[in-house]
Image (cartoon, rainbow, N blue to C red):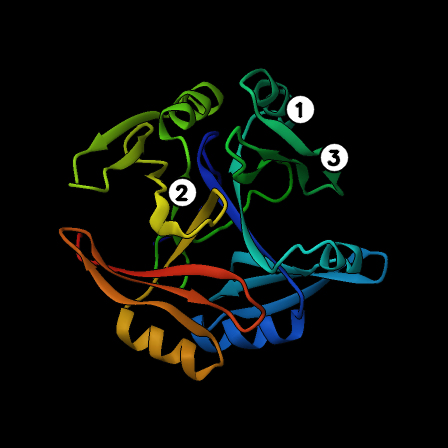
């Protein structure tokens, strides 16, 4: 796929990992996806690590601040949606019943961002790009290809995200686990699942899927790199084969080998 030069407002465009062990995370993802890493100063003596694949930015990671770790914030992947205005998006999220975890702020000359919590508690970020558009490569093996919301109230989530980003929910009947795709333009913006008691009390969240050439081989490689296979490779009819993984620092993500062209 050619290098991406812009992202349409309303689409996921960036992913970064907040981690308790930045060095270990860099080693793990380099081994799993072949990512290169470039450390950039981020103030306060910290660094923001840009991950690249073939020289194209695909994601990033940063070290969680000690006070965040002390407060129980785990290592986690965060997803960003491009918007025309971070301030307007945060204001609209409030009107729709969401809350603002971090008020909009400038990230040097790179862009402006805010962190939002939806009415059920799932957290995501909005990104108003300036000199950094977000990922310059997606939907290829080794890059992010899908984001999926797990929520305790799918109907209210439909209202919230439709009002915030203009997404149109389309729910398919999949037996005891209906699946919603967020239609947006020529292809979906992401997906959604209604959580049940089988989730064991997990909080609502957005899950990032990374594409791979071989789900079984990638899951085995993750385990060999001291990651954990939380759900073994499993087929999704007419979609592909996926697995749920945890990196050595505790961050959860999914991998998928798509069966569709």
The image position of residue 236, as x and y in percent, is 19, 55
Q: Which residue is mark 3?
A: 105
* Badge 2 element: strand
Q: Which residue is mark 1?
A: 87
* Badge 1 element: helix
Q: Marks 1/2: CA distance?
A: 26 Å
**In the rendered image, which quarter contains the N terminus?**
bottom left
What label does residue 186 carry, if any?
none
The answer to whether residue 172 is above or below residue 150 is: above
Examine the rendering and report whether any part of residue 3 can be seen. no
Mark 2 Cα shell of 10 Å, populated few (<14), some (14-19), many (≥20): many
Contact, mark 1 vs mark 3 (Cβ under 8 Å): no
Q: Is residue 34 left or right of residue 46?
A: left
Task: Give the number of the mark in front: 2 or 3.
Answer: 2
Q: Marks 2/3: CA distance?
A: 27 Å
Image point 36% across, 36% down: which residue? Answer: 189
Examine the rendering and report whether any part of residue 170 can be seen. yes
The answer to whether residue 83 is above or below residue 77 is: above
Q: Which residue is mark 2?
A: 150
Question: Residue 7 versus residue 245: which sits nearer the camera?
Answer: 245
Image point 58% across, 24% down: which residue? Answer: 89
Contact, mark 1 vs mark 2 (Cβ under 8 Å): no
Q: Which residue is farthest bottom? A: 224
Q: Is residue 81 left or right of residue 244?
A: right
* Badge 3 element: strand
Task: Give the number of the mark in front: 1 or 2.
Answer: 2
Image point 53% across, 31% down: which residue? Answer: 118
Mark 1 Cα shell of 10 Å, populated few (<14), some (14-19), many (≥20): some
Q: Is residue 54 left or right of residue 62?
A: left
């Amino acid at each position: 796929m050619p290098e991406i030069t812009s992202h349409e407002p309303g689409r996921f465009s960036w992913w970064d990992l907040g981690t308790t062990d930045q060095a270990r995370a860099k080693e793990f993802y380099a081994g799993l996806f072949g990512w290169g890493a470039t450390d950039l100063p981020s103030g306060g003596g910290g660094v923001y690590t840009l991950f690249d694949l073939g020289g194209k930015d695909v994601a990033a990671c940063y070290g969680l601040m000690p006070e965040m770790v002390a407060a129980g914030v785990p290592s986690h992947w965060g997803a960003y949606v491009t918007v025309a205005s971070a301030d307007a998006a945060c204001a609209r999220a409030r009107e729709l019943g969401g809350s603002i975890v971090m008020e909009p702020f400038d990230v040097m000359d790179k862009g402006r961002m805010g962190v939002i919590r939806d009415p059920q508690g799932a957290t995501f970020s909005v990104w108003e790009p300036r000199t950094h558009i977000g990922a310059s490569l997606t939907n290829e093996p080794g890059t992010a290809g899908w984001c999926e919301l797990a929520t305790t109230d799918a109907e209210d989530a439909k209202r919230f995200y439709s009002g915030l980003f203009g997404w149109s929910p389309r729910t398919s009947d999949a037996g005891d686990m209906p699946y919603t795709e967020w239609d947006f333009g020529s292809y979906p913006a992401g997906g959604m699942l209604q959580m049940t008691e089988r989730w064991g009390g997990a909080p609502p969240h957005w899950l990032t899927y990374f594409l791979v050439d071989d789900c079984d081989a990638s899951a085995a490689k993750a385990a060999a790199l001291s990651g954990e296979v939380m759900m073994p490779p499993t087929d999704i009819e007419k979609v592909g084969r996926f697995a749920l993984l945890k990196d050595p620092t505790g961050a959860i993500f999914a991998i998928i080998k798509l069966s569709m062209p």
